[in-house]
Image (spheres, helix red, strand yellow):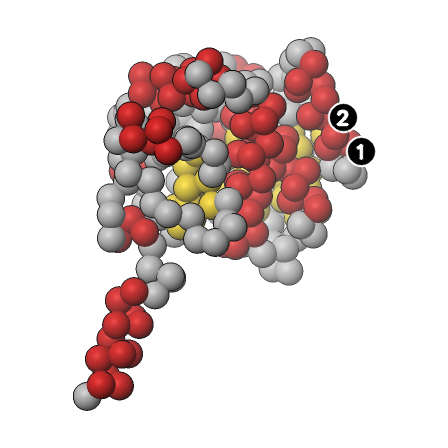
Amino acid sequence: MLNIFNLFRKLIFTDNIPAQSIKMVKYLKQDEAINIDQELFDVYKFSVDQLMELAGLSCATAIHKCFPPNDYKKVLVICGPGNNGGDGLVCARHMQLFGYSSEVYYPVQTNKPLYCNLVHQCINSNVTVFNSLPESIIGYDILVDALFGFSFKPPVRPTFLNIMDILKTTNKPICSIDIPSGWSIEGVPESDGIKPELLISLTAPKECARSFKGKYHYLGGRFVPKALENKYQLELPPYPNAECCVQL
């Protein structure tokens, strides 16, 4: 009887049970997500590139857990012009270091020093960066969606229509960073919207993540100070050991 009890206890309290099944994490509205980011910059004195590095690393780590390079070698990271695209550039570099063959489609590049440096780092890490849409995505094993973040407002600009159509119709696994591109942060996604297999929420999940139906949902970016977490009642799950991401 004691052995049965110990087995049951092990099943209940195993580290493999997602933290969200024990304690629900808060889902952020758009204004909350903006305010938290602003406090990280203004109150806690994080720089944009600091947070991008931590976010991009956590995204690459989550992807590695779900789609390891032995089975999903070639990856296309699709980057937009904002911070979400910056996270994607960092993610691509780390994925290259993790053993993937990373390429970046970056159609609207900015001349801001931060983004120029991220592109330079990718190129010098043997990550190919190009601004023309690939003729085919058949050769890629997974796609990383880093087009639009939580500040996105429709309609989609003409420059991104073709790649959005590809993301909506592809049968390749899609890994979306923070927000599946084209989704409203607080609304229900359109029936023909992007359907990622993996969503990596950053800081905390956004309201739209309630509609996520994919296989894997991870929380990344282990950088939220406890006081900030308490202020916004985020109820973040504990990150195991030294992990930079946790499955929800």
Residue type at tag 1: Asn
Q: Is residue 189 visible?
A: no
Q: Quadrant of residue 30?
A: top left
Q: Position of residue 234 (x, y in %)?
A: 29, 33
Task: Name the residue nearer the viewer: 170 or 211.
Answer: 211
Q: Position of residue 27 (x, y in %)?
A: 28, 33
Circle 1 is placed at which residue position? 124
The crowding category of the residue bearing disc 2, from other C-alpha atoms within 10 Å (few below 14, some 14 to 19, many at least 20), is few
Q: Is residue 58 visible?
A: yes
The mark found on residue 120 in the picture is 2
Q: Residue at (38%, 62%) from the top-left corner?
A: 16
SS for tag 2? Answer: helix
Contact? badges 1 and 2 (CB < 8 Å): yes
Q: Position of residue 21 (x, y in %)?
A: 26, 53
Q: Quadrant of residue 178?
A: top left
Name, please, the residue furthest toward the top.
111
